[in-house]
């Protein structure tokens, strides 16, 4: 990528990772702080000392990871904090230690060089796998390598600016780096950081997950931008569209600001609307309080599997019941939809080892996984059945692919809780697989309600992975086939007299509200911080949506 002309507007398009926009000057992240790492041969007598240096570095890096995990848990959430558990496991893995020690002993290299060779080797193996998810996980090895080298050199992740002593160190700046890593999102001062731009890093990378949790606009996929960028360059980053504008003109800045009037990290609540429901998506029980603060009409999607992932173990029936009761009571009579454990793909339960699959998106996940895991399903079903004695409970089945599968799941659920004499339980279905959408007329005669999961539906509908930079441009919510499908689903639900909601990122984008309403959708489920902007968009429409929720 060539240098950009000073003060001349240049527009680039990358991969959007975390929504929002920011306009500020650039700070360059010091990705190359280890270039001057010492490399030397060690004598036989010095080998034990080098191994001891490595072991001390592992302990120190592990303590820092524990600190970060606690910090992220407080600032972002328990599920995101578990990212650093995976890194801690790599750091303490005996296979990794044996490899480093072998390099020190056999090749007579110092600990720094042994760490680089060993972890580069592991990272390279994962990068060579033709699987986007595995390639994203490869960055964990690079992250561990950098943490150990930081310990050896007594360094901290830092910024590298031409401003020298006048460097703002990221405060009120947009940081540009080569790779979006967890270190980039937590080791710097995120409270005052305005945006992130990186050359590499997919939407499912750990750094991207943290950026979204922190509400920091982020864009990746701009190869060579760091080397072509100077500290202090003015830049605009739009994490919603993936657009980056270098030296933006005043008209560009004004137009972007006008298009995002509600862009703020803590939006004010907007009063509920009479004929359009805006429910909240929550990840953990503690998220319910924020949903209530934003005056959500209820919880349309409680991602219950994240409770287990965050805990790092399978939770007992009593544990689950207490969490579920906390959410149910917090919402003060508003409906709460408990999606059953949606394990598989990139969400793997910590209680047992799942097989490595060539294409996990099409593999053992969702309802398939539940039907094959009766003990897991039993624990969750019984916790929900106990909750139903306090009041009505809504259960939703993930990744349903057929009517028969839905029947099997519902029958299994009922059998597992029959002895508890549960209260009223409504059974819903996620419509996120084309085969289920094509059978919606039958499904909605048997299910009590449904939710359209647009994230996965788009992936399967267009056969495109939006996290793959080579094909992400084909992932567009403007495709007519999606809207035709949504219209058909809305009509089918109306005929069956069943509630239909839309969740997924599309549902939380105000610009899609007119089309959703035109398609007959009267209910969406979005993250709590998007509730106000969605309601404001619907309220501003000249013709309010009719009843029929």
Image: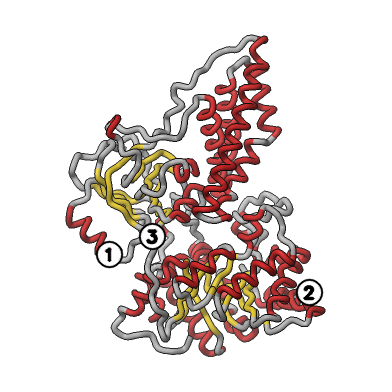
Q: Which residue is mark 2?
A: 416
Q: Badge 1, how many Cα within 10 Å: few under 14, some, many 20+? A: few
Q: CA distance from mark 1 to mark 2?
A: 51 Å
Residue at 70 percent across and 63 percent down: it is 369
Mark 3 or 2, nearer chain start: 3
Q: Position of residue 265 (x, y in %)?
A: 38, 60
Q: Secondary structure at mark 3?
A: loop
Asked where in the image residue 158 lies, by quadrant, the reply is top left
Q: Is residue 54 above or below residue 1?
A: above
Residue at 18 percent across and 44 percent down: it is 8
Instruction: Give the label on residue 373, or none.
Output: none
Q: Secondary structure at mark 2?
A: helix
Q: Position of residue 490 (x, y in %)?
A: 49, 82
Instruction: Give the label on residue 265, or none.
Output: 3
Q: Which residue is mark 1?
A: 259
498 horizontally vs 180: left or right:
right
């Amino acid at each position: 990528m060539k240098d950009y002309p000073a003060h001349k507007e240049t527009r680039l398009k990358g991969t959007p990772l975390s929504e929002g926009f920011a306009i500020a000057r650039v700070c360059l992240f010091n990705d190359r702080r280890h270039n001057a790492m010492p490399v030397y041969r060690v004598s036989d007598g010095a080998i034990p000392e080098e191994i001891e240096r490595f072991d001390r570095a592992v302990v120190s890096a592990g303590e820092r990871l524990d600190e970060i995990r606690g910090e992220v848990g407080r600032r972002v959430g328990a599920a995101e904090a578990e990212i650093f558990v995976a890194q801690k496991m790599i750091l303490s893995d005996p296979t990794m230690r044996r490899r480093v020690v072998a390099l020190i002993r056999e090749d007579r290299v110092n600990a720094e060089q042994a760490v680089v060779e060993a972890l580069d080797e592991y990272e390279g193996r994962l990068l060579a796998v033709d699987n986007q998810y595995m390639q994203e996980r490869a960055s964990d090895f690079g992250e561990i390598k950098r943490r150990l080298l930081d310990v050896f050199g007594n360094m901290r992740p830092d910024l590298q600016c031409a401003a020298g002593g006048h460097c703002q160190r990221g405060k009120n700046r947009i940081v540009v780096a080569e790779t979006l890593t967890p270190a980039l999102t937590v080791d710097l001062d995120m409270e005052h950081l305005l945006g992130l731009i990186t050359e590499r890093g997919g939407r499912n990378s750990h750094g991207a997950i943290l950026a979204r949790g922190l509400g920091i606009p982020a864009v990746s996929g701009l190869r060579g931008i760091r080397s072509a960028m100077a500290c202090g360059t003015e830049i605009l980053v739009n994490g919603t569209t993936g657009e980056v504008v270098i030296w933006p003109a005043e008209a560009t800045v004004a137009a972007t600001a006008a298009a995002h009037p509600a862009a703020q990290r803590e939006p004010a609540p907007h009063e509920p609307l009479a004929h359009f429901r805006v429910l909240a998506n929550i990840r953990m029980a503690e998220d319910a309080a924020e949903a209530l603060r934003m005056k959500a009409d209820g919880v349309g999607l409680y991602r219950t599997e994240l409770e287990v992932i965050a805990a790092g173990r399978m939770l007992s029936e009593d544990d689950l019941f207490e969490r579920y009761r906390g959410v149910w009571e917090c919402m003060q009579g508003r409906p709460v939809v408990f999606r059953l454990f949606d394990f598989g793909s990139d969400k793997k339960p910590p209680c047992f080892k799942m097989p490595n699959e060539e294409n996990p998106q099409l593999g053992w996940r969702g309802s398939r996984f539940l039907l094959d895991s009766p003990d897991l399903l039993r624990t969750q079903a019984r916790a929900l059945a106990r909750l139903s004695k306090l009041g009505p409970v809504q259960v939703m089945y993930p990744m349903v692919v057929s009517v028969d599968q839905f029947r099997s799941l519902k029958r299994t659920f009922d059998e597992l809780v029959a002895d508890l004499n549960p209260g009223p339980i409504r059974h819903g279905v996620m419509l996120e697989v084309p085969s289920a959408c094509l059978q919606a007329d039958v499904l909605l005669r048997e299910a009590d309600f449904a939710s359209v999961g647009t994230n996965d539906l788009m992936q399967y509908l267009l056969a495109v992975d939006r996290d793959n930079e080579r094909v992400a441009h084909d992932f567009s919510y403007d495709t007519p086939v999606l809207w035709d499908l949504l219209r058909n689903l809305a009509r089918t639900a109306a005929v069956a007299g069943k509630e239909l909601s839309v969740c997924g990122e599309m549902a939380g984008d105000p610009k899609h509200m007119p089309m959703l309403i035109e398609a007959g959708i009267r209910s969406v489920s979005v993250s709590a911080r998007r509730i106000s902007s969605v309601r404001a968009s619907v309220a501003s429409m000249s013709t309010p949506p009719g009843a029929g929720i």
